[in-house]
Amino acid sequence: MEIKFERFHLQSDLRSPLKEFETISVPTEVRIDPLTKRRSRIITWGLPSQGKFDFSKMAGESKGCFFCPESVLQKTPQFLNEIVPEGRICIGRAVGFPNLNPVGSYGSVVVLCPEHFLHLNQFTPQIYEEGLSVAIEIIQRTMAFDPDTRYWQISQNFLSPGGSTILHPHLQVIGDPIPTNEMEWLLDASSSYSQRNGTLYWSDLIRIEKGLAKRYISHMGNVHWFVSFAPIGFNEVCGSVEGHGTITTVGKEEIASLAKGIVSTLKYYYEKNLNSFNFCIYSISGEAHYQLLLRIISRTPLQPYYLNDWTSFEVLQSELTANIVPEELCRDIRPYFP
Ligand SMILES: [Zn+2]
């Protein structure tokens, strides 16, 4: 077994105007992901929170969108007859249909609820159980039509800092016959690890993290929740589903556990005055060395004088930053999980 948690301590010394020009040291930690070997920078300072943003004007002005109940079954696209003869897929209050502006072979949208806007503490496990169930149904029906489409993302972009153009809560479901960069990195590294060690990286990682008890949050059934050693975004929380590489094989219990973990994380974000986030479930079929992974990160909140969190470091150096020490995040978020 060769899971290594490598880190480098960097330090910047300066005379601070905030402390009468005394010399101070500001540490930064560079961590290397044990699987992908990608570097992350853990920054130890943060800007003060501006409090909660008032969404009432924004939500009021944009209400009555294409995803609102009066339009969603009239004005949204329908699937091809060969894939979904009834046009759209509805489970509970969630509605799935093709994306009018797709970015790959099969792009769909799942409107999560009739409410046009929800605060992060208003999302419920039931909302995500229904939304994920629609996403799974879309993937299963599409794969029955086109079995070569093995690489799927179920993701959510919430609010404009997360890249969403529509306020109304929704998921994206995207399937392609080729992997994304991130999927290829995960698959190649997982496969190399298995060849070298004869074991599944994800099982080894979860066993080690459980033992260390510094970044392991909890498990619900066979869904394990933990904070990455080397996060690729702010406040990153991961979930991994033991025994599955694709979401199409998971049962009701696992869907409920995934939904609960997402909602627990969002409640924590809300308490920290965050309001925008991204998550992705990387669902890949036919890969024995891979285990289904969900990643959720917060984005800098929507606020007056909004500050984008992707600087030249992320965009031009491909070096991702996090603004909380992973072990502290784990300690802080644990009470929010069942
Ligand atoms: Zn709406």
Image (cartoon, rainbow, N blue to C red):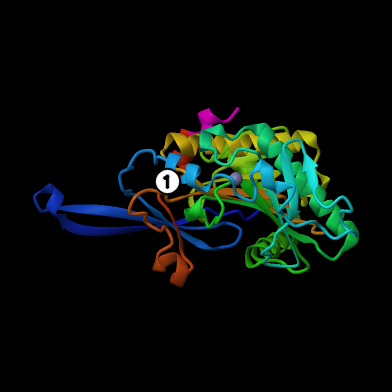
Q: Is residue 181 above or below residue 134?
A: below
Number of numbered labels in the structure image: 1
Residue appearing at x 53%, y 30% in the figure: 336
* Magenta segment, prevailing SS (helix, strand or loop): helix
| Residue 335 is one of the magenta-drawn residues | yes
Q: Residue furthest bottom?
A: 316
Q: Looking at the image, can residue 222 be seen?
A: no
Residue 197 among magenta residues: no
Name the residue at the left extreme.
20
Q: Is residue 322 visible?
A: yes
In the picture, measured across the screen, residue 213 lies left or right of residue 317, that is: right
The one nearer the camera, 110 or 74, is 74
In magenta, the rendered stretch is: 333-338
Task: Look at label 1 and name its amino acid.
Answer: Val
Q: Residues within 10 Å of mark 1 (few under 14, many from 20)?
A: some
Disc 1 target residue: 325
Q: Quadrant of residue 69?
A: top right
Residue at 79% in and 59% down: 287
Percent x, y of residue 191: 73, 62
